[in-house]
Image (cartoon, rainbow, N blue to C red):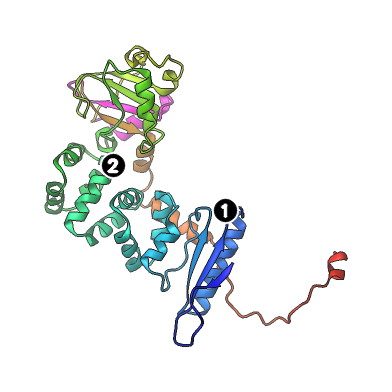
Amino acid sequence: MLNPLTPSAPDRARRFLFCTNECVGLGHMRRTLTLARAVTAMDSSASALVITGAPLTPGLSLPAGDQGAQTLLATYRELNAPDLAHALLELPIKRRHEVAEALDDERLADVLGELPETEQILILGTLDEGRAADVLEEMDPDDAADLLAELSNVDRNRLLELMEPDEAEPVRQLLKYSEDTAGGIMTSEPVILTPDATVAEALARVREPELTPSLASQVYVCRPPSATPTGRYLGLAHIQRLLREPPSTLVAGALDESLEPLRPEDSTEQVAAHLATYNLVAAPVVDENGHLAGAVTVDDLLDHLLPENWREKLARQESASEPRPDTRPDTRPNKVITPEMVRRG
């Protein structure tokens, strides 16, 4: 389990490789990480890399030490975006920004969406303008709008100008709404179909891996154009209902006509009441002209209703709950366990 990566030498820093396989349990992984922490704590010049067949869990990150950003990336490769965001918050600021710089645009965009707004701004500020615009293009439009809303008008407009026009336009639309309204928390990219779409087409669309479960729970039928703001909104269809319909059936024949859509100016309290009343995880937002402007999901609503610093609090709680290794030398005499002692229990 413990292998030095380089030969021991008085003038060379020691690097250690800790390996576990995917068959071991979480307890074994924690003990391995505790041992790795102890090694780096006792020798400040040493560094350690943990390789596991299963993803490391939140809060199990190693102290930065002398590890490079690429080494940390190898450790974090299998983490999902929320867990990687938590792991980044545990790193020193300099190393945190190095890791962010080393991530590709899509991965960094996903992680930024899970970080506190203050940290989003700091990381975005370390990137050159061109790359910052590229990362914003990869973000969900509602997350990009939330981030840009925290910047000065000059910086916001500059980044929007650097973005591709078709990527910037949905973000500009979202920036028009107050952050405490349905328009301010909605996404402008729900699943939108035309009236002639079939159930088979709808089910194919909701299988797209980038869709969140809440967005994949409904499809919205509108007349062209299909990009928000769409043509006239006709209604929504629940995926649960579509699963009971023949694949060749038109989605327009399975619309739920009992639900009124939300309005962009509705407050977040009204949004919460609407979702709770009708047991929904998403709802359409339709403007005064009858065009679909976007959809509100329960995850975006919760993100708005929770305290602003809930991510920092969660990271601190997880960090505080981790056991700290005892790095004091063991002065107890060695004890040999004989077969007779084992037999006696």
Question: 39 or 6, which is in the foreground?
Answer: 6
Query: Cβ–Cβ below 8 Å for labels 1 and 2?
Result: no
Question: 74 or 155, which is in the foreground?
Answer: 74
Q: Residue furthest bottom?
A: 10
Horizontal side of 250 relative to 340 (left or right) equals left
So how many labels did they put on this image? 2
Residue drawn 57% across the image and 53% down it: 22
Residue drawn 13% across the image and 49% down it: 162
Mark seen at residue 194: none
Horizontal side of 145 relative to 24 (left or right) equals left
| 177 relative to 345, above or below | above
The quadrant the N terminus occupies is bottom right
Query: Is residue 17 located in the magenta-colored stretch of the structure?
Result: no
Residue 296 in picture, x, y percent from top left? 32, 32
> Looking at numbered disc 1 in the image, what kind of residue is underneath it?
Glu
Query: Of the residues tagged 1 and 2, which is closer to the observer?
Result: 1
Q: Is residue 252 visible?
A: yes
- The image quadrant of residue 140 is top left
User: Helix, strand or loop at disc 2?
Assistant: loop
- The image quadrant of residue 119 is bottom left
* Residue bounds of the magenta highlight: 265-290
Residue 213 in picture, x, y percent from top left? 41, 34
Q: Which residue is mark 2?
A: 140
> Looking at numbered disc 2 in the image, what kind of residue is underneath it?
Asp
User: Helix, strand or loop at disc 1?
Assistant: loop
Mark seen at residue 22: 1
